[in-house]
Image (cartoon, grey):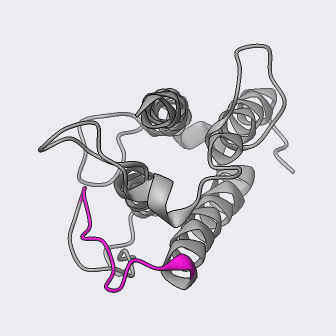
Amino acid sequence: MARDRRMKLLLDVFNQAFSGRSWHGTPLWGALRGVSPSLALWRPGRGRHNIWELVLHTAYWKCIVRRRLLGDPAIAFPRLGSNWPSLPSPTDAAAWAKDRALLKHEHLLLRRVIARFDAAQLRHRGWRSQWSNAAHIYGIASHDLYHAGQIQLLKRLARKE
């Protein structure tokens, strides 16, 4: 558990954005509840992202933030591509479960780093980044919430078709 009150707050915000109860609405993990592979693949239009792509994108950035906080160039996302990794082939129920598990795994790895992070390093820049370590931590929480909102909207749009 985080020792410093700043770290405790950042960890609380990080947890709440992913899977915690909050006043603002559904967190990222909650937004994925009940999403089938077919719904995850639905696109609102040509060239628009689908839920499955958002899952891989959020998992990717959790990995990159972990690498930046630790300054470890050996940390690499386990899938090909960056920012928007390609969908697996085939895109079936097993692959969807695997990619949701990847998101949760990347979240837990980053959570472990944040829980042990030295508060004295919050103002320092993240490795190979213009942003501070603190900005990376609250930024990744904001990133989760942003995409949780997108997922909620995509679910509603898909049900109208």
Please tell me which residue is depicted at 75% across the width and 43% down the height of the picture. 19
Q: Is residue 20 left or right of residue 85?
A: right
Image coordinates for residue 60, horizontal then vertical, percent: 38, 61
Please tell me which residue is depicted at 25% across the width and 45% down the height of the picture. 129
* 153 vs 114: above or below: above
Residue 91 can be seen in this image: yes
| Magenta stretch prevailing secondary structure | loop
Image coordinates for residue 107, horizontal then vertical, percent: 61, 58
Residue 62 can be seen in this image: no
Q: Is residue 75 left or right of residue 156?
A: left
Residue placed furthest toward the top:
23
**Quarter residue 46 falls in:** top left
Residue 38: say if magenta: no
Please tell me which residue is depicted at 69% across the width and 52% down the height of the picture. 34
Give the total of numbered labels. 0
Residue 89: say if magenta: yes
**Quarter residue 161 falls in:** top left
* 89 vs 145: above or below: below
Residue placed furthest toward the left:
47
Q: Which residues are magenta?
A: 83-93
Depth check, front residue: 45 or 133:
45
Depth check, front residue: 53 or 67:
53
Image coordinates for residue 109, horizontal then vertical, percent: 63, 67
* 114 vs 44: above or below: below
* 72 vs 20: above or below: below
**Quarter residue 36 falls in:** bottom right
Please tell me which residue is depicted at 56% across the width and 84% down the height of the picture. 94
Image coordinates for residue 139, horizontal then vertical, percent: 46, 32
